[in-house]
Amino acid sequence: MRIVVVTGGASGIGRACCHVLSGKGWKVVVLDVNGEGAREVAAEIGGVPGTLDVGDEHAVEAAAERIEREVGPVYGLVNSAGILAVPVPPEQLPMEEWDRVVRINQRGTYVTSLAFGLRMAARGSGSIVNIASINAFRSMPFHGYAPTKAAIVSITMNLAAEWGPSGVRVNAVSPGFTRSPALQAKIDAGERDVAAIEKATALRRLMEPEDSAYAVAFLLSDEASGITGVNLPVEGGWLVMPSWQSYPGIRGDWP
């Protein structure tokens, strides 16, 4: 049974990854800064829980050493830990908030990839999937968050080239508007228009966390053995829609 580590595994896409991967026969180590949440998910899937702040490189290295010693050699890593941001103008974004988002999203992905990826490379096999975002493809009003997701794509490509000769594949999944607890809370508060979001996608629906989780499972698997350095959008066709809005009326009320 192969071992996979999922950071940010207590909720949202990370939690869905834990459930999907467990269902596909992986031994899942659930890591999250929310230790209680990690324990709950691990109990649901028969996994191994752990508390981890991915922005602390010393804690990450200690966790990697402990997991490999107590659980076994890690073949898969899913970097799903991340924090969201509020869409405010630059002058309203405190630099301490910008630094906090960069520390977890960008730095956390990098140091966690190093801690586990170097061990994979030494053994000659492994697969890493980083959770980026459609923010990496388009301009959005997230002046701290969006650049971290673009950086994650760059990290993915760089490490794919670096570790490919050592048998380690590194890919990214970029979710679109996904019905995570964070988005659902904004919907419930009236801060997001579901109909408008759905109309902006070719498939006319929000993504569910499992949509990204199944893409992650594929990229981790041997079925994707020839794939490395890619950034796979899972967004229901949101990326292909904007240019069609220049042609209103040719499909009735569509788009």
Image (cartoon, rainbow, N blue to C red):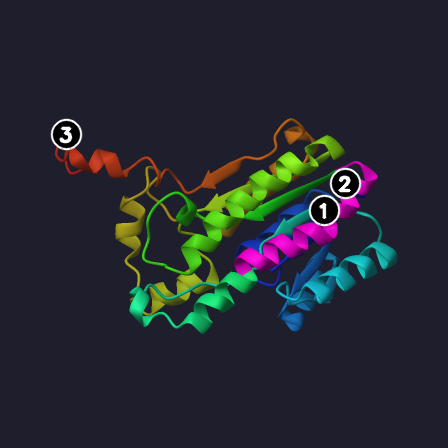
Q: Provide the major secondary structure of the magenta segment.
A: helix
Q: Is residue 75 visible?
A: no
Residues at marks 1 and 3, CA–CA distance in whole angstroms:
50 Å
Q: Residues within 10 Å of mark 2 (few under 14, many from 20)?
A: many
Q: Look at label 2 and name its amino acid.
A: Ala
* Callout 1 amino acid: Gly
Give the crowd class for mark 1: few <14, some 14-19, many >=20 residues within 10 Å.
Answer: many
Residue range (magenta): 105-125
Q: Residue furthest left?
A: 249
- The reply to whether the magenta stretch includes residue 78 is no
Q: Circle 2 — which element?
A: helix
| Amino acid at circle 3 | Ile
Tell me where residue 235 appears, x and y as whole percent. Answer: 41, 43
Judged by depth in the image, the label closer to the viewer, 2 or 3, is 2
**Mark 1, residue position:** 117
Q: Residue at x 61, y 44 (%)?
A: 129
Asked if the residues shown at circle 2 and circle 3 are in contact, with their CB atoms under 8 angstroms apart, the answer is: no
The first of marks 2 and 3 along the sequence is: 2
Give the mark nearest the N terminus, 1 or 3: 1
Mark 2 vs 1: CB contact within 8 A: yes
Q: Is residue 247 above or below residue 112?
A: above
Question: Along the horizontal axis of the image, is 22 left or right of 255?
Answer: right
Which residue corresponds to the image point at 48% horizontal and 45% vertical from the top-left?
Answer: 174
Residue 118: image x %, image y %?
Answer: 75, 46
User: Residue tagged by mark 3?
Assistant: 250
Tell me the element at label 1.
helix
Q: Quadrant of the N terminus?
A: top right
| Residue at the (58%, 42%) spot, across then down | 156
Res. 49 in view: yes
Which residue has dot 2 on it? Answer: 121
The answer to which of 113 and 91 lies nearer the viewer is 91
